[in-house]
Amino acid sequence: MILDKFYNDILFQISKGRVELDMMYNVLFETKINGKTLYKIDDKIKNNNSLFIPTLFINDKSSFDEALLKYYYKASDFYNNIDNNEQILTMLFNNATEEDFKNPINYINRYIDFLDNNIDLPEPTYISMLDSNIVIELKKEPIYQETPYALYIKSVKDSMYYNFPVVRFGISNNKAYIYAVQQIKDNNISEENLKYQKKIHRLLFKVNEGFIKEDEIDNINNPENITGISPSALVSLTIMLSIFENMNIEEVIIPTMLPVRYNAKEISYKVRINLLEKKGLDVENLNNIMHDLEQNHENIQRNLSDKFLRYFRRLEYCFSNIDISLLPYELDNNAHLKLKKYENCNNKLLDEIYKSTKNKTRNK
């Protein structure tokens, strides 16, 4: 029943770019089983240069089905508050890279591990710093996020708080995968709390102390420049990497391009244009709007990928135990970071945060 639904319904709709369940899901990729295309993607979609349409290669269907069913049942138990379990099948490959589509069994098994594994963290963990308490918590994530777990960090003082970016990560085969570092939006902040947040923001600029501004890598025309990095993101990643070292994790993998998520935005633009067309906008205006949307999306994706890597370049610059061993497409679609035993850091604040986290989260 589950496999029939996946092959005869979900994958068919995915080949069209939209899956209708409790709501519409924009998911698009091609599927080949033992070299044979399961459902042909419409030429109009396939020839759209703004889309990156990956191909799911199922070369060992028996093993693939076994992994798929195992994931489905584990995910059904983990995401026990979703309205429709078919979301599990629909959204499974949202976070796959091109390499993952070529090796889907490995990818599915990795996400099974993500469901099973998390960090051994006393909940919550407190670190006294920045004239506040930094609170570190591991939380389960909803199915639409990149990973089943995420690290939430905030500084608190009395009733005031400052949210650091959330780190979305997974652990498999003693390797850590970091998919996103995302800022939480705050709404309806009191004036008192806003003053506190501004104070923390000012204190965080200490992460720039000791940074050599004249270094070539700081040249704004250099594609590897590490300026303009969010101090709060550096703090979140410093805490995350310190926890990883305590877990004896020596390799961190950083996916930078997830084609299904990219396509979802492009498809949403097309749907929007179709609605405008029905309202009577002329073709020339519609084409101009679509071109602007696609160009803006491509620029945003490039900036996000570049900025994501720059976070880790900056940490590599600061910490002696962090080394980017491979960049995307040197081996696969990911960046690879080696994490060694902590020795030193050239920034006082990051050094204090790393060591305090390491002491607080060390297994007793």
Image (spheres, grey):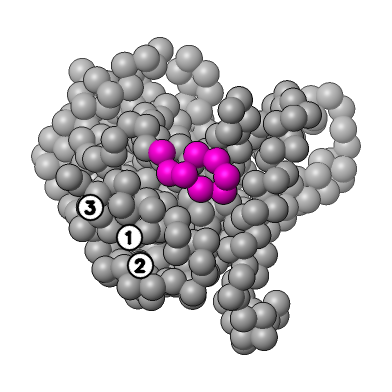
> Is 247 left or right of 192, judged from the image as shown?
left
The answer to if 195 sits in the magenta stretch is no
> Quadrant where the N terminus lies?
top left
Which residue matches tag 2?
A: 337
How far apart are labels 1 and 3 at the CA level? Answer: 12 Å
The stretch of residues the image draws in magenta is: 126-133
Amino acid type at image mark 3: Met
The disc placed on residue 252 is 1
How far apart are labels 1 and 2 at the CA level? Answer: 5 Å
The disc placed on residue 247 is 3
Neighbor class of circle 1 (other Cα within 10 Å; few <14, some 14-19, many 20+) is: many
Residues 37 and 100: in front is 100
Say whether disc 1 or disc 2 marks the residue closer to the N-terminus. Answer: 1
**Residue 46, x across and y down, in percent:** 52, 49
Element on which disc 3 rests: loop
Dominant secondary structure of the magenta stretch? Answer: strand
Amino acid type at image mark 2: Leu
The disc placed on residue 204 is none
For discs 2 and 3, the disc positioned in front in the rendered view = 3
Rendering quarter of residue 2: top left
Please say if the residues under marks 1 and 2 sit with CB atoms less than 8 Å apart.
Answer: yes
Residues 14 and 340: in front is 340
Q: Can the viewer see residue 105 in this picture?
A: no
Element on which disc 2 rests: strand
